[in-house]
Image: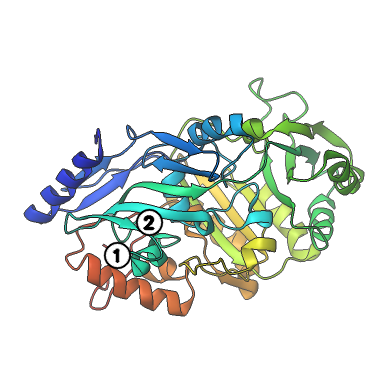
Amino acid sequence: MAADERDVRVAVNFAAERGVPLAVQATGHGRNVGLDGGLLLATGALTAVRVDPADRTAWVSAGATWRQVIDATAPYGLAPLSGSFPALGAVSYTLGGGIGLLSRRYGFAADRVRQLDVVTPDGELRHVTADTEPDLYWGLRGGGGNLGVVTGMRIELLPVARVYGGALAFDVDADPGVLAGWWRWTRDLPDELTSAVSMLGYPDLPVFPAALRGRHIAKLQLCWCGPAEQGERLIAPLRELGECVQDSVGELPYAESGSIFAEPERPHPYRSSPVLLSALDADRLDALRRDAGAAPVMCVVGIRHLGGAMARPPRVPNAVGHRDAAYLLSVLSPVDADAGTVADTHRRLTAPWQPDAVGRPLNFSFGPLAPREVLAGFDEAAQQRLAELRARFDPAHTLRPHHPIPTPGRCRPG
C-alpha cells in the first residue's frame, strides 16, 4: 500500500530488480482476482486533489475517486469529465479513455489531461506533457496502464455547476418499443445531451422499489448540460414512449450526478462483453430485449449514445480508439453463475451486432481478454505505436496491466 510517490518508485524498482510482475490497483467496479507470484501495488491511499480555480484545472492523485474530485471542484462551479459511477478511480478511468456524463459535449476524459506524473518500469519518475514526453503523453491518454504507474494527473475542469438529468424507467415487456424509440430520438440531438439505456430483469423482492419488482425494466439515463427548460423540451418525447413507472429527471447539482445511473457502490466480480457499434436498428433492439429477458443468467444490458465531441480529435492526439463509433453496447453478468453459461449467453446476445462492430471499449471489459480482444480497443496505427512504446518502456514486461498490449514476439498477454 503506497503512502506516497516515493513508495511507488520503491515498489517499481523492487519488482524490476527481482524480475517479478507488478500489478496496480486503486479502485473499481469489480474485484481483483489477485496476482500469482507477483507484487500488487495499491494506490488507493493517494487521494490528494488540488484545485486551481483560476486555471480551471485540478491535480488528481492516483487513488482519488471521482467523488473526491467532484466534491473538491463543485464549490467553484466547476466539474471534471467524470463517469457515471463517482466511486471509480479518476486516474485509471482516464487512462482507459473515459466516457462520462458530459462526453458528447466535451469529449473523452483523456482528451482533457494536461500532465501526468508516471513512474516508468526503469524506476524513473517522469513529468509527462505534450512538450516534455510526447510519446508517453500520447500513449498514457487512452492506452491504459501499459507504460508505467501514474501517480497523478492534471486535468482541465469544465464550467458546469448544474445539469438536467435523471432516469426514466419503463417495463419493456409491456412497452416493447421503448428501446427503438430511444434510438430514434438519439439520431438528432445536440451535443449537450448525453444519454444511455440500461435493461435488467428485477426479481420480485422487497429490496427493490415496488414499481420495478418482477418486471423487465429499461432505464433511460439522461444528462443535459444546458438550460433546464430546453432540456425538458428535448426529453419530453421520451415520456411518451410508454407508461413511465419511475421518473427521477430534474435539475440537480453536478455533485449529485451519480444519481443518474445510481450504480451499486459495493464492488462485485463481473464478466462483460462490450462492443462499439456504427449503428443500431429497431429489429435487433427488439430481439435483444426478448433474448435478454429470457437469458439463463442475470444480464445487465447497457447501450450508450456516443458521437458529438467524442467523434472529434482532441487538440493533441492520443491513443483513444474508434472515435467513429456511434453507440456502445455491453452485456454484463455477475460471476456467481456458471462461467460457461455466462460466456455462451453473452456471445448469443452480441452476435447479431457483429456486422456493425467497429471495436471494443476496454474500460467496459471485465475479465481476461485474448490479445486480439485487447487490440480491438485501438485503431490499427495505434496498435502498432502502443506495442512499440511498451517494448521501449517495459521490455521485460514487468507491468501486468489489466489489458496488456501484445508486443512483437509475445504470443500471450503479459
Q: Residue at x 40, y 74 (%)?
A: 383
In percent of width and height, residue 393 lies at 24, 66
Q: Residue at x 85, y 36 (%)?
A: 244
In percent of width and height, residue 395 lies at 19, 68
Disc number at residue 203?
Answer: none
In percent of width and height, residue 333 lies at 53, 45
- Please state which amino acid type lies under the numbered disc 2: Pro
In percent of width and height, residue 281 lies at 77, 66
The answer to whether residue 341 shows anywhere in this view is no
The residue at which mark 2 appears reads as 368
Task: Name which of mark 2 and mark 1 comes first in the sequence.
Answer: 2
Q: Residue at x 28, y 73 (%)?
A: 407
Q: Secondary structure at mark 2?
A: loop
Q: Secondary structure at mark 1?
A: loop
The residue at which mark 1 appears reads as 413
409 versus 351 height, above or below: below
37 versus 122 height, above or below: above
29 versus 387 height, above or below: above
